[in-house]
């Protein structure tokens, strides 16, 4: 399942946010990082805020065995 970790600069004194949603999509538009799901926009982060966004995937199940 895709997940995104949003980290803010230390001087902003904001907590890091972990956003998890199987239908989540991240796009960049007009200086904004925009998270959308099946219902529409759910979170927008302005680029001027200095936040770092990192995709962190968690495995849903064990990896498939190697092909022979």
Image: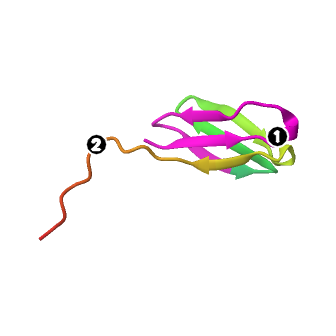
Q: Is residue 6 magenta?
A: yes
Query: In the visual, does 67 lie left or right of 4?
Result: left
Q: Is residue 54 above or below residue 24?
A: below
Please state the extent of the stretch shown in magenta in the rendering: 1-27
Residue 10 — which label? 1
Q: Residue at x 59, y 34 (%)?
A: 18
Q: Can you identify the residue that label 2 sits on?
A: 61
Q: Secondary structure at mark 2?
A: loop
Query: Which residue is nearer to you in this view: 42 or 48?
Result: 48
First in sequence, mark 1 or 2: give its number: 1
- Image quadrant containing the C terminus: bottom left
What percent of the width, then of the height, locates residue 44? Answer: 73, 37
Q: Residue at x 37, y 45 (%)?
A: 59
Q: Residue at x 85, y 43 (%)?
A: 49
Query: In the visual, does 52 lie left or right of 10?
Result: left
Displayed quadrant of residue 67? bottom left
Disc number lying in front (1 or 2): 1
Displayed quadrant of residue 10? top right
What percent of the width, then of the height, locates residue 6? Answer: 67, 41
Q: Residue furthest left?
A: 68
Q: Residue at x 69, y 35 (%)?
A: 16
Protein image colouring: rainbow
Query: In the visual, does 9 lie left or right of 25?
Result: right
Disc 2 packing (10 Å; few <14; some 14–19; many ≥20): few
Query: In the visual, does 48 lie left or right of 44?
Result: right
Q: Is residue 22 magenta?
A: yes
- Image quadrant containing the N terminus: top left
Q: Residue furthest front?
A: 10
Q: Secondary structure at mark 1?
A: helix
Displayed quadrant of residue 46? top right
Distance between mark 1 and mark 2 Cα atoms: 35 Å
């Amino acid at each position: 399942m895709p997940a995104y970790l949003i980290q803010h600069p230390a001087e902003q004194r904001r907590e890091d946010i972990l956003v998890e949603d199987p239908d989540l999509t991240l796009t960049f538009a007009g200086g904004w990082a925009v998270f959308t799901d099946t219902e529409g926009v759910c979170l927008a982060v302005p680029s001027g805020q200095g936040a770092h966004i990192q995709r962190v995937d968690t495995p849903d199940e064990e990896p498939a065995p190697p092909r022979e």
